[in-house]
Amino acid sequence: MEITTQIIWLFVLAVPIACISWTVTHEEIFREPHEWCVKRSKFDKLLISRKFFYLFTCEYCFSHYVTIFFIVLTDYKLLLNDWRGCFLAGFSLVFMANIYMSLFALLRQAIKKEKVEIEKIENEKENNGNSNCN
């Protein structure tokens, strides 16, 4: 595979990795299993059990496993056409997926901030309108 094709695959393949990792670790649809995993990661007796369940609570950790799944699924390799290419691809995909997730988190934070500011302005207008009527 040519280097340009490999780079395109890197940027594109990181999107579903980021999406799956974020959804499983942050979104409401997985809230109950997430809370259960958080509890198990904090209070299980065995260290290995705590670490296993922690993997489902951290988007960075979980993205490694999603990446492994996608590398096996697609046989994607980066720069080298052997196991070293899989190794490079794995860490590169995790890196890109986590950049995407960080940008998504910043975007969501900015949107929430805007919503709060708009609501505050609307409430102030509403309060000023009510005080003018009295």
Image: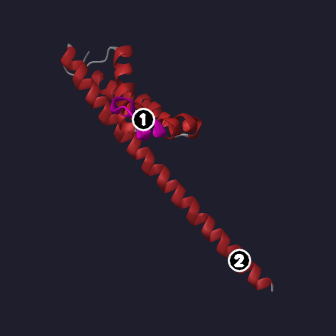
Placement of 16 over or under 111, stated as above or below? above
The residue that disc 2 covers is 127
Is residue 128 in view?
Answer: yes
Please indicate whether residue 87 sits to the left or right of residue 26 in the image: left
Q: Is residue 81 above or below residue 46?
A: above
- Please give the name of the residue rendered at 49% of the width and 50% of the height, measured from the top-left corner: 108
Residue 32 at x, y = what percent? 57, 37
User: Cα distance, mark 2 to mark 1?
Assistant: 51 Å
Rendering coords of residue 51 (x, y %): 36, 33
- Name which residue lies at 42% across and 37% down: 41
47 inside magenta stretch = yes
> Could you say which quadrant of the image residue 118 lies in?
bottom right
Which type of secondary structure does the marked residue at label 1 adopt? loop
Return the residue at label 1: 44
Q: Which quarter of the rendering shows the C terminus?
A: bottom right
Q: Secondary structure at mark 2?
A: helix
Residue at horizontal 70%, vertical 77%? 127
- Decide whether residue 68 is among the magenta residues: no
Q: What residue range appears in magenta?
A: 38-50
Q: Is residue 78 visible?
A: no
> For this rendering, which residue is in front, 89 or 34?
34
Mark 1 or mark 2, which is nearer the start of the sequence? 1
Based on the displayed image, in which of its 4 quarters is residue 88 positioned?
top left
**Within 10 Å of the Cα at label 2, are there few (<14), some (14-19), or many (20+) other Cα atoms?**
few
**Residue 92 occupies quadrant:** top left
Q: Nearer the viewer, residue 60 or 82?
A: 60
Query: Which amino acid type is marked by label 2?
Result: Asn
Name the kind of residue labelled 1 in the image. Asp
Magenta span: predominant SS is: helix
Q: Give the numbered dot on residue 52.
A: none
